[in-house]
Image (tube, grey):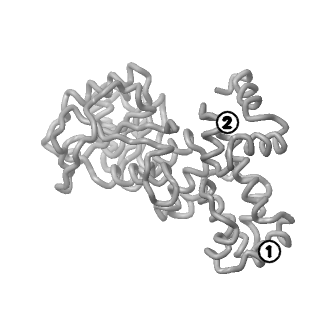
């Protein structure tokens, strides 16, 4: 299966470790089921112009996974900077690689003082960018054509995403996972990172009326069950196992669903999976077989039958209609 999201990551000498770790771990949790970390749905590669280990500001060193290659192989090229007072210069090869990526219309990400690196490469002229509040004036003085914005965890302008670093890197990772892999993948990554409630709210516009009703239900068993369903939408988990995870029997859980939502837990979960297949058909070029596998259907025939019954169109018909409307 071709990953829906591919990111090339660059780090400068003395880069800060937190944004790299948070950003990468968010991709890792979105990329696979549970905590296995296989690069199935997302792919990330640490790039450099040499095989030499790169030191971080805390002294840890990271080893590149690959040398600079054609940037069009990636959906994004991300750069992580470090302390502004570092005496270690930015390699010219890194600057040139960012410029090459920009020339080839690859989207860019700047984390921590990665915004300074992008500005140095001339890629932020006339653009807004997120910057740590303590560095807003410094950036403005060094690069007058850049429009720094302090106090925001994420700024997107002209194909460039920036964040001020630290834990805000999760906002960037969540945003690109949401764009390329869908709300369920983004939600799963955030939940596995134990992020706060605001970060878990990935836009209520993505909730169906039934899902919103379930999450606002006064029966804690319903809320716990639906939260787990959303988190594990890709996993072949039985209703019996789901009930056991929240401390009830399958019979008790089924009774609670029927009383509160007028639908069985298995039917509710099936509707969640179908909603996600609908998003994948419209927003990715994955085959129906791949989507069936990812969303927990036995095979593509099973998916197509359920999909057509729910949406009155086959996946192929929906994708064709979506393209004809100019939505992709």
Q: Is residue 328 above or below residue 230?
A: above
Location of residue 322 in the rendering, given as x and y in whole percent from the top left corner: 72, 28
Q: Quadrant of the C terminus?
A: top right
Location of residue 187 in the rendering, given as x and y in whole percent from the top left corner: 57, 55
Q: Is residue 267 above or below residue 87?
A: below
Q: Which residue is mark 2?
A: 281
| Residue located 27% across and 30% down the image | 68
Location of residue 299 in the rendering, given as x and y in whole percent from the top left corner: 68, 44
| Residue located 50% across and 48% down the image | 174
Location of residue 92 in the rendering, given as x and y in whole percent from the top left corner: 20, 27
Q: CA distance from mark 2 to mark 1?
A: 32 Å
Residue 81 in view of the camera: yes
Label count reads 2
Camera-side residue of 104 and 42: 42
Assess whether mark 1 and mark 2 are in contact (beta carbons under 8 angstroms).
no
Local crowd size for mark 2, using a 10 Å CA cut-off: few (<14), some (14–19), many (≥20): many
State the SS at label 1.
helix
Place residue 270 in its image quadrant: bottom right
- Relative horizontal placement of residue 51, taking residue 179 as reference (left or right): left
| Residue located 50% across and 55% down the image | 189
| Residue located 66% across and 36% down the image | 288
Camera-side residue of 222 and 82: 222
Place residue 58 in its image quadrant: bottom left
Furthest-left residue in this view: 87
Circle nearer the N terminus (2, 1): 1
State the SS at label 2.
helix
Q: Which residue is mark 1?
A: 256
Camera-side residue of 56 and 63: 63
Residue 125 in view of the camera: no
Camera-side residue of 87 and 240: 240
């Amino acid at each position: 299966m071709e990953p829906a999201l591919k990111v090339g990551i660059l780090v400068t000498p003395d880069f800060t470790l937190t944004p790299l770790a948070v950003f990468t771990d968010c991709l890792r949790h979105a990329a696979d089921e549970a905590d296995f970390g296989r690069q199935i749905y997302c792919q990330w590669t640490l790039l450099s112009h040499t095989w030499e280990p790169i030191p971080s500001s805390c002294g840890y060193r990271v080893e590149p996974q690959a040398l600079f290659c054609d940037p069009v192989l990636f959906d994004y090229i991300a750069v992580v900077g470090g302390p502004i007072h570092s005496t270690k210069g930015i390699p010219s090869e890194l600057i040139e690689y960012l410029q090459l990526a920009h020339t080839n219309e690859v989207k860019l990400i700047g984390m921590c003082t990665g915004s300074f690196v992008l500005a140095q490469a001339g890629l932020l002229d006339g653009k807004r960018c997120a910057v740590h509040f303590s560095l807003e004036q410094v950036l403005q003085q060094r690069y007058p054509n850049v429009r720094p914005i302090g106090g925001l965890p994420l700024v997107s302008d002209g194909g460039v995403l920036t964040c001020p670093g630290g834990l805000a890197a999760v906002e960037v990772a969540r945003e690109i996972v949401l764009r390329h892999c869908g709300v369920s993948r983004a939600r799963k990554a955030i939940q596995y990172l134990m992020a706060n409630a605001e970060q878990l709210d990935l836009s209520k516009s993505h909730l169906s009326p039934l899902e919103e009703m379930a999450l606002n239900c006064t029966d804690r068993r319903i809320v716990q069950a639906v939260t787990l369903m959303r988190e594990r939408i890709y996993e072949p988990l039985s209703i019996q196992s789901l009930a056991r995870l929240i401390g009830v029997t399958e019979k008790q859980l089924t009774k609670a669903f029927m009383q509160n939502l007028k639908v069985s837990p298995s039917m509710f979960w099936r509707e969640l999976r179908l909603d996600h297949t609908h998003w994948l058909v419209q927003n990715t070029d994955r085959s129906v077989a791949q989507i069936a596998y990812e969303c927990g259907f036995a095979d593509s025939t099973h998916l197509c039958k359920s999909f057509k019954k729910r949406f009155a169109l086959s996946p192929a018909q929906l994708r064709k209609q979506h393209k004809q409307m100019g939505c992709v």
